[in-house]
């Protein structure tokens, strides 16, 4: 199975900050990577697919980049409603696997 | 509006069985692969099964292979997960989810763009 790692595991930031999360795959997955947002008690929500494509309706302050084994997720200007846990997921190989998550809270 | 509504969760003893259902609406159900994913209390997400749009090409990770069976009834727009030989470590919120791409080839899954609200399964004596 492809192992996904994320860093940091948690971070605190202020409104307006630029926030960056990294995700690393244990082997080359090309650009077959998604990013999800999950708020407490809610289902995950797809934000970014194919590593860098913004899902319809998702604010443009969210972005993703990377290919191969190293990926980055960025919130350009943190808003209060962005407090959540963020997960990367690869779909290059079965089984689909998720990263352990990055918990983002407000400073 | 695309919607997924899970049901069937509950409390079951170790070794017992449970069948989850997921009613889909708002999209052409048979054109999309569907998945089940779970989240243990305080833990991350785990993909536990998927099935192609035509009801073939089911896939299971090793953690549930031989115990869980995914199926679908395209005439009823409903996805199922039959869970047997349940263990304490199967305790989780179970989500059904729609694949992102339509008419995907067998065994190709692209991630999930619509999720249900989840149903809770507790395995305990």
Image (tube, helix red, strand yellow):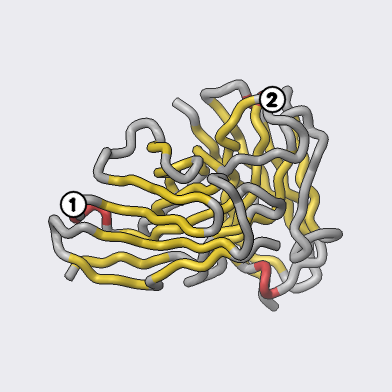
Mark 1 is surrounded, within 10 Å at the Cα level, by few (under 14), some (14 to 19) or many (20 or more) other residues, namely some
On residue B48, the disc is none
Looking at the image, residue A22 sits to the left or right of residue B94; the answer is: left
Q: Position of residue A22 (x, y in %)?
A: 41, 62
Image coordinates for residue B85, horizontal then vertical, percent: 81, 66
Instruction: Work out whether B78 lies above or below B11.
Output: above
Residue at left offset 61%, top offset 55%:
A28
Residue drawn at the location 82% of the way across and 35% of the way down: B56
Residue that badge 2 annotates: B30
Work out whether residue B114 or residue B84 is closer to the camera in this orientation and state it. B114
Within-10-Å neighbours for mark 2: few <14, some 14–19, many 20+? some
Residue B64 locus on image (x, y percent): 76, 61
Q: Chain of mark 2?
A: B
Q: CA distance from mark 1 to mark 2?
A: 40 Å
Residue nearest the observer in this picture, A82 or A16 = A16
The image shows a total of numbered marks equal to 2
* Eye-nearest disc, 1 or 2: 1
Q: Quadrant of the C terminus of chain A?
A: bottom left
- Kindly indicate the quadrant of the structure image that contains residue B88: bottom right
Disc 1, SS = loop
Chain that bears disc 1: A
Q: Which quarter shows the N terminus of chain A?
A: bottom right
Is residue B68 among the parts visible in the rendering? yes
Secondary structure state at the residue bearing disc 2: helix
**Residue B25 % position (x, y):** 55, 27
Residues under numbered marks 1 and 2 in contact, where contact means CB atoms less than 8 Å apart: no
Between B48 and B18, the one nearer to me in the picture? B48
Q: Residue furthest right?
A: B66
Check residue A77 in the rendering and tell me which mark sits there, or answer none.
1
Taking the image as shown, residue A79 lies to the left or right of residue A30, namely left
Regarding residue B9, the answer to whether it shows in the image is no
């Amino acid at each position: 199975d492809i192992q996904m790692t994320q860093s940091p595991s948690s971070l605190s930031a202020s409104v307006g900050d630029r926030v960056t999360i990294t995700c690393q795959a244990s082997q080359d997955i090309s650009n077959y990577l998604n990013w999800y947002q999950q708020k407490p008690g809610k289902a995950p929500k797809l934000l970014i697919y194919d590593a860098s494509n913004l899902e319809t309706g998702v604010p443009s302050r969210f972005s993703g980049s990377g290919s191969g084994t190293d990926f980055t997720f960025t919130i350009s200007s943190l808003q209060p409603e962005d407090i959540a846990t963020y997960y990367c997921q690869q779909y290059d190989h079965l089984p689909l696997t998720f990263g352990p998550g990055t918990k983002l809270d407000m400073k | 509006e695309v919607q997924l509504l899970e049901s069937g969760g509950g409390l079951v003893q170790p070794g017992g069985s449970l069948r989850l259902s997921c009613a889909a609406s708002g999209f052409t159900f048979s054109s999309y692969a569907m998945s089940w994913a779970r989240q243990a209390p305080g833990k991350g997400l785990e993909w536990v099964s998927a099935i192609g749009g035509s009801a073939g090409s089911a896939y299971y990770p090793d953690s549930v292979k031989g115990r869980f069976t995914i199926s679908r009834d395209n005439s009823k727009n409903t996805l199922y997960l039959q869970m047997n030989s349940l263990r304490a470590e199967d305790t989780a919120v179970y989500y059904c989810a729609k694949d992102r791409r339509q008419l995907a080839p067998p065994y190709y899954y692209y991630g999930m763009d619509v999720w249900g609200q989840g149903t809770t399964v507790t395995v305990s004596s």
